[in-house]
Image: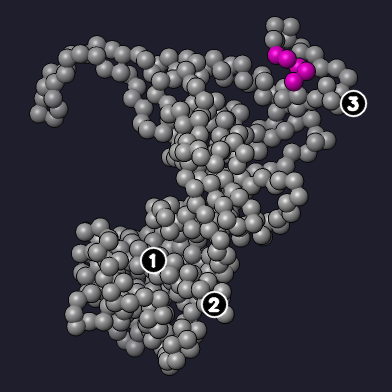
Amino acid sequence: MKVLVFTGLSHSLVVRPTIHGEPLLTAQAFYYLEELESVAQLRYETGEQELSEENLEYLVDNYLFEYSKIDPRSKISFKVTRGKFWRNDPNEMYVQADQGHTEALALDMANDPSVKAIQALDPSDSIDLSDWRIGHNYVAKSFHNYVDAICGVFEKKVSVVVLPSEYRDGYLGKLRVIKAGHGLIDFHQAESLDNISIRAISPSATSISLGISKASAVIDSLPVERITTTKRHTPILLSHYFSGLKEDNPLKSYVGFYNVLEYYFEEAPALLGRSAKTELEQLLCVLELLTTDADILAFICGLDTHLSRAISADLQTSSGVVIRGFSPAPPNSHRSDLARWLYEIRCAIVHSKKTRKGRATATFEPYSSEARNVGIALPFVRWLSILCIEKDHALRVTP
């Protein structure tokens, strides 16, 4: 729903919405921005060194980590398992479209001396065959007519008479046949997203124009948000963090964030000059390295009221064994009780033992209603993982 401009590291970066996959036969007249994924765009200026794929990913990770701290709702991540871009073979006569499912004829008679002639078999065709995107141009003519026709529907109204009932109020008057939600753009505006680059955004710009549309229901601009950072964090910590950030499964998300904390299980006791024999003691040392009881209380005060109350209740697990709630109240040490709560949740997630020493144990069945209960702990492990990554950076740059 916006354009992000990142600066401060070796290269500037723009993150913007995009319609992936060269839609051709699958192109839509309209798109909602909320449903679009994002693309990170980097431009190499003259003299700038081109980054390897590994270094490019590291650059994006550091920028997106900074943004995730600003927008807790964001799940933007560079970690994808299936790419959506490809390189067309310039020696082939077709280019790919529609996520690679469609082939569109592409012959450049003006610049390719091997192409001697192109002629439509249907004499009624009025396509410019000197334009190399021949397949796209054939589709575009019909598609533009379709977009224009749909645009006209937005202005359509009908006169209605509806009597009141026990389920709704009555109505007498005119009603639109289509009501669009916020964030709607047409196909031509969606295509124009590809023209947004660091050069297209002036230093003082607060928004980017998407161009004029024939439809009145669309938006005409995107806000610009700027994020600057000079910090480069430990790559493996960023990987664990983003594995937690992008997951919709609360169990997997929890483990991703928890792994960031686990990275310091041996280091934290050593930094504090403490001995920690168990994982729970190690986790407590990590919390003591990262935060204070007052910080924890302040974090809880900033949570949604419903969530801040829910954490003190017993947490139901799939095995029927409950995990005692986290109660940040005297005389409890907030860090100690938080460490106990987070550790017990972690054990219930990663272990599936029916019993331990003959007694039933707390376990979470994946995709169960009880598994969704873990969601109340995610803000805590995410917050702590951010603190851990920041602490790691501070320890590495401090002489």
Cα distance in 3D space between marks 1 and 2: 23 Å
Q: Answer few, some or many: residues within 10 Å of disc 1's Cα (few below 14, many 20 plus, some between 14 and 19).
A: some
Q: Nearer the viewer, residue 251 or 285?
A: 285
What amino acid type is highlighted by mark number 3?
Ser
Front: mark 2 or 3: 2
Furthest residue in direction top, as rendered: 124
Residue 68: percent from the left, percent from the top?
45, 56
> Does any portion of residue 347 appear in the rendered image?
no
Identify the colour scheme used.
one colour
Residue at point 64%, 47% (across, down): 42
Name the secondary structure under disc 2. Answer: loop
Front: mark 1 or 2: 2
Front: mark 3 or 1: 1
Name the secondary structure under disc 1. Answer: helix
Q: Which stretch did the figure color magenta?
A: 127-131
Residue 183: percent from the left, percent from the top?
41, 33
Cα distance in 3D space between marks 3 and 1: 61 Å
Instruction: Residue 114: give its label.
Output: 3
Instruction: Residue 398: give its label.
Output: 2
Is residue 380 found left or right of 121 in the rendered image? left
Instruction: Point out the image quarter for the C terminus.
Output: bottom right
| Dominant secondary structure of the residues highlighted in magenta in the image | loop
Would you place residue 254 above or below residue 127 in this image? below
What amino acid type is highlighted by mark number 2?
Thr
Is residue 310 found left or right of 146 in the rendered image? left
Residue 294: percent from the left, percent from the top?
28, 74
| Figure label count | 3
Residue 303: percent from the left, percent from the top?
27, 60
Instruction: Residue 383: give its label.
Output: 1
Q: Earlier in the sequence, mark 2 or mark 3?
A: 3
What amino acid type is highlighted by mark number 1?
Trp
Q: Answer few, some or many: residues within 10 Å of disc 3's Cα (few below 14, many 20 plus, some between 14 and 19).
A: few
